[in-house]
C-alpha cells in the first residue's frame, strides 16, 4: 500500500511542476502546422516508441473537425522493415534520421520523445531537422539531456523515475490532441459563416462565381471593408481575380493585380509562402501605398496564401479601415479556409 501511495504522490508532485508555457507553445506550433499543411514527424525508443505511435494515431484521427485540414503526421517508429534495414546497414543511431532525410522540409515539425534526452537516434534526426529549418520539439525527463538543449521547444518532465516520465508524456499527448480538437471546434462555433462557406464551397461553383462568394463570405466573416482574391497558374501568373470595394465585388483581370504582386503585400505572401498580419498599413513596408491613400488614415490588413501540391495557387487579402482590427484568430480561420480552397477548386 505504501508503494502505491508513494507512486501516486510523486506523480502528482511532478504534474504540478510541468512547464505549462512550453506545452502551450507546442499546441500553438502544431495548430499553425495544421493550417499550413506541413508535415509532422514523431519518434522515440522503447516505451517512448509506443507513446510516439499513440501520438501519431491521436493527432491524425482524434483532432479532425469538419472544414478543417487534417494533420499530416508520420510515425518513425512504426515501420519494422525500415527500422531493421537502417539499423542493420547504417547503424541504430541513424534509424530515424535516414527515414526523414528525403522527406523533411523547411517549416515541418520534428518531435523527439526521450526520457533521458540522450537517445542518439533521436538526437541525430532532430539535428538533421534543424539543418533544414524545421521546427523541433522534445519531450524529455531527468535533466533534459542533449535533446532538451537543442530543440526549439523542450517539454521536460522533472523526474528521475522513468515510469512516471513515460506516464506523463502519454498524458501530455492526450492533453495536446484534445486541446487542438476543441480549439478547432470552438473557433468554428464562434464563426457561423464558416459553416456557410463550407456548404457553398462543397457546391463546386465555377471559378468566377466561387471567387466572388469566397470574397463576400470572408469579408462578412472577419468584418473587413474591402479585399481581393487572385488565382495563379503553374507559371506563377495571375489568371483570374476579384476585388471588393465600396460594397461591390467585381471580377478583375491579371493586369489589375500586377503591381500588387510585384511590390505589395500579396507579393510578399507569394514570395514567403506564409500569412501576413498588418496591424497598421502606414507602418508596414509590405503595404503598397497608392496615391489616393495619401489623405487616408491608417488601416489594417490580413493576407493568406492558397497552397496546393506545394505550390502557391492564389492569395486572399482583406482590409479594414481601423488599425489592429484583425487578430491571430482571424489569420487561423482564413488560413483554414485557404487550405480548404486550395485542396480542391483552386488547384489550377
Image (cartoon, helix red, strand yellow):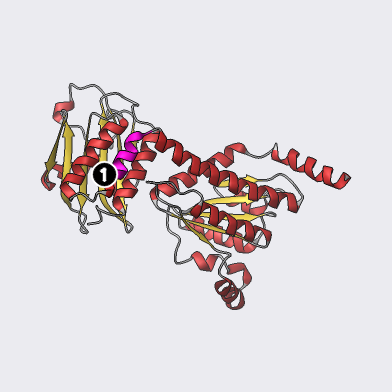
Residue visible at 60% across and 75% down in the picture: 84
x and y percentages locating residue 250 in the rendered image: 13, 38
In the rendered view, does 78 fall on the left or right side of 239? Answer: right
The reply to whether residue 343 is visible in this rendering is yes
Query: In the rendered image of this protein, does residue 118 appear above or below residue 34?
Result: below
Q: Is residue 71 above or below residue 336?
A: below
Residue at disc 1, secondary structure = helix
To which residue does mark 1 refer? Answer: 200
Farthest residue to the right: give it: 2
Provide residue 278's location: percent of width, then percent of height: 32, 33
- The residue positioned 57% from the left and 54% from the top of the image is 55
Q: Main secondary structure of the magenta part?
A: helix
Percent x, y of residue 76 = 55, 63
Compared with 205, 250 (above or below) is above
Q: Is 316 included in the stretch rendered in magenta?
A: no
Q: Is residue 193 magenta?
A: yes
Q: Quadrant of residue 195?
A: top left
Instruction: Choose between 126 and 214: the one closer to the eye.
Output: 214
The magenta stretch is 191-199
**Front one among 192 and 60:** 192
Q: Position of residue 94 (x, y in %)?
A: 58, 68
Residue drawn where x is 79% and y is 40% of the image: 9
Amino acid at each position: 500500500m505504501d508503494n502505491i501511495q508513494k507512486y501516486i504522490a510523486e506523480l502528482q508532485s511532478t504534474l504540478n511542476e510541468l512547464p505549462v508555457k512550453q506545452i502551450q507553445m507546442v499546441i500553438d506550433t502544431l495548430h499553425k502546422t495544421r493550417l499550413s499543411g506541413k508535415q509532422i514527424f514523431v519518434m522515440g525508443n522503447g516505451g517512448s516508441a509506443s507513446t510516439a505511435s499513440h501520438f501519431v494515431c491521436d493527432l491524425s484521427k482524434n483532432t479532425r473537425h469538419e472544414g478543417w485540414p487534417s494533420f499530416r503526421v508520420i510515425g518513425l517508429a512504426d515501420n519494422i522493415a525500415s527500422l531493421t534495414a537502417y539499423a542493420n546497414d547504417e547503424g541504430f543511431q541513424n534509424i530515424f534520421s535516414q527515414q526523414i532525410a528525403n522527406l523533411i522540409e523547411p517549416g515541418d515539425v520534428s518531435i523527439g520523445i526521450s526520457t533521458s534526452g540522450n537517445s542518439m537516434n533521436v538526437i541525430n534526426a532532430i539535428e538533421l531537422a534543424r539543418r533544414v529549418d524545421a521546427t523541433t520539439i522534445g519531450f524529455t525527463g531527468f535533466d533534459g539531456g542533449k535533446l532538451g538543449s537543442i530543440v526549439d521547444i523542450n517539454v521536460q518532465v522533472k523526474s528521475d523515475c522513468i515510469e512516471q516520465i513515460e506516464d506523463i508524456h502519454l498524458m501530455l499527448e492526450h492533453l495536446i490532441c484534445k486541446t487542438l480538437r476543441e480549439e478547432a471546434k470552438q473557433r468554428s462555433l464562434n464563426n457561423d459563416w464558416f459553416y456557410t462557406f463550407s456548404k457553398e464551397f462543397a457546391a463546386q461553383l465555377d471559378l468566377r462565381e466561387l471567387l466572388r462568394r469566397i470574397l463576400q463570405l470572408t469579408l462578412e466573416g472577419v468584418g473587413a471593408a474591402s479585399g481581393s482574391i487572385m488565382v495563379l497558374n503553374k507559371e506563377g501568373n495571375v489568371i483570374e481575380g476579384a476585388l471588393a470595394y465600396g460594397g461591390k465585388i467585381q471580377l478583375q483581370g491579371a493586369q489589375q493585380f500586377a503591381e500588387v504582386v510585384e511590390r505589395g503585400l500579396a507579393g510578399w505572401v507569394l514570395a514567403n509562402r506564409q500569412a501576413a498580419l498588418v496591424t497598421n498599413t502606414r507602418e508596414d513596408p509590405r503595404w503598397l501605398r497608392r496615391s489616393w491613400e495619401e489623405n487616408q488614415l491608417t488601416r489594417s490588413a490580413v493576407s493568406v496564401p492558397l497552397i496546393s501540391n506545394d505550390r502557391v495557387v492564389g492569395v486572399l487579402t482583406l482590409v479594414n479601415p481601423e488599425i489592429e482590427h484583425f487578430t491571430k484568430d482571424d489569420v487561423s480561420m482564413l488560413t483554414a479556409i485557404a487550405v480548404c480552397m486550395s485542396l480542391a477548386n483552386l488547384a489550377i
